[in-house]
Amino acid sequence: MHQNFLDIFKKALDGPVMTENDFEMKRFMPKVGEITRKYGIKYDKDNPVPDDDRAADNLFNAAVEFLKEVGVYCQDTNRVMEFSEEEIKYSIRNVKTECKAGDGVESGIFGPRKPDDNKLPWFHVGSGIVCSSKEIMYNLIEAYASIKEADSISISALDSIRGIPVSVGSPAELYAAIEGVKVGRDALRRAGRPGLPIMNLISTAASAETTIAASVPQFGLRPSDGWLCGAISEMKVDYGVLNKIAYLLNWGANIGAETSPILGGYAGGPEGTALVSAAYIIMGVVVMMADYQLTFPFHFNFGCSTSRDVLWAVASSCQATSRNLPSPVIWLGYIGAGPNTRQYFYESAAHILTAVTSGAPSEQTPHPAKAVKVDGITPMEAIFAVETTKAASKLNRHQANEIVKKLLEKYEPNLSDPPEGNIYQEVYNIKTGKPNDEYIKLYDEVKEELFKIGIPYE
């Protein structure tokens, strides 16, 4: 039963031939509806953070059947990679339960959590949001590493190199990827934490060729960092991601399976999104041989992860997998509102409370402004995420549910037109790397407000 990655890859050569449209319309979508009905998966809009363990286990069993029935589509061979129930369950039983990341005193073990677990999650801070300059990128990474609780970081991407825009597969992309790694390592040294693992590699590289070329050790990366190998929505891969995985396996480096189920897309509504989200976590173990995972379900229309229905899908799939598949998973929220807005903090708190009490092994800094705005993030959001994650670990699902409902009242009506907020240089001093008084005042006010509705900040 044991399979190595060549056995997995061979399924992309031997599986049934099918057009991508047929996979989506005749295989994927019908099975979403069929399996959600068969297992009685029901969205509960009144309880965005459910606490029904039986329902969570039921969803996990449904996700196993879904992966078996649907498989994974390989775009380069136009074939479906199929897996038997026995193969899937073998991978589940033999899952990697720990990811060793970082070097020296910054090395650590990233492991699983359960729903209602008071164990602190792994603190993964930062983002790959694009920066307009190396100076801002230095400031962000140094600030992330200076958060004493930080266990690992994500580093920013550069949008250009010497004024040349970065485009996929171009020499500019390669230069920017190598430069991004150099900036990341230098900033970590400047913060006095050179061994801290970077776990969103390589943020500036979209192509597999660039990722592999920029990953060689002479540019500063180590196997104890982490590489994101992204599936294509929904349930698809290509040779690019498979080549990344093959390279990392041969190096003995940490593989991060990256997935993003879309509510309102082929997965349908919250029930289907919860099903696909759980199936993706299983797929990360079975197909991508992940050491850790990053997942971020989001809403097709709103472009964020904080609508009531997405929160329910996050909670349900996180509970299903954290109870039945002890894989280290980073849950990431995309936030509608931008930095220096009350709504950002409301949305961020809602996502963190939902994921952490549902058993998320890690909650990454929720990304402001849908993660599409250049320079659209500051260290303040990372500080808030760490403090709120610590507070959330003291709560159970029932308590989180009541608080999340109060938070939804504050921002739900504005999700279709969230406040844009500011970019880094508007609220932080580029020379000193410090926030302005206005943002500090807002941060303190919002924390006090959230403490009064039940978030137990220290």
Image (tube, helix red, strand yellow):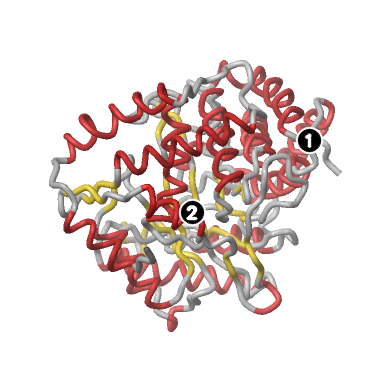
Q: Residue visible at 27% across and 49% down? A: 82
Seen from the viewer's position, the closer of residues 212 and 114 is: 114
Where residue 313 sits: x, y (%)?
52, 30
**Quadrant of the image containing the N terminus:** bottom left
Q: Is residue 34 above or below residue 79?
A: above
Going by the numbered disc 2, the residue's amino acid type is Ile
Residue on which disc 1 sits: 447
Q: Is residue 111 above or below residue 42?
A: below
Q: Residue visible at 55% across and 50% down? A: 325
Instruction: Give yes or no for contact between labels 1 and 2 (Cβ–Cβ under 8 Å).
Output: no
In-image side of 418 versus 171 (left or right): right
The CA distance from mark 1 to mark 2 is 40 Å
Q: Residue visible at 35% across and 29% down? A: 32
Q: Is residue 389 above or below residue 222?
A: above
Instruction: Give me the disc on residue 288.
Output: none
Where residue 445 sits: x, y (%)?
79, 32
The answer to which image quadrant residue 9 occupies is: bottom left
SS for callout 1: helix
Seen from the viewer's position, the closer of residues 183 and 219 is: 219
Whichever of labels 1 and 2 marks the residue nearer the N terminus, that label is: 2
Instruction: Give me the disc on residue 92.
Output: 2
Q: Residue visible at 24% across and 64% down? A: 170
10 Å crowding of disc 1: few (<14), some (14-19), many (20+): some
SS for callout 2: helix
Nearest to the eye among marks 1 and 2: give it: 2
In-image side of 375 versus 250 (left or right): right
Q: Residue furthest bottom?
A: 218
Going by the numbered disc 1, the residue's amino acid type is Lys
Seen from the viewer's position, the closer of residues 269 and 86 is: 86
10 Å crowding of disc 2: few (<14), some (14-19), many (20+): some
The image shows a total of numbered marks equal to 2
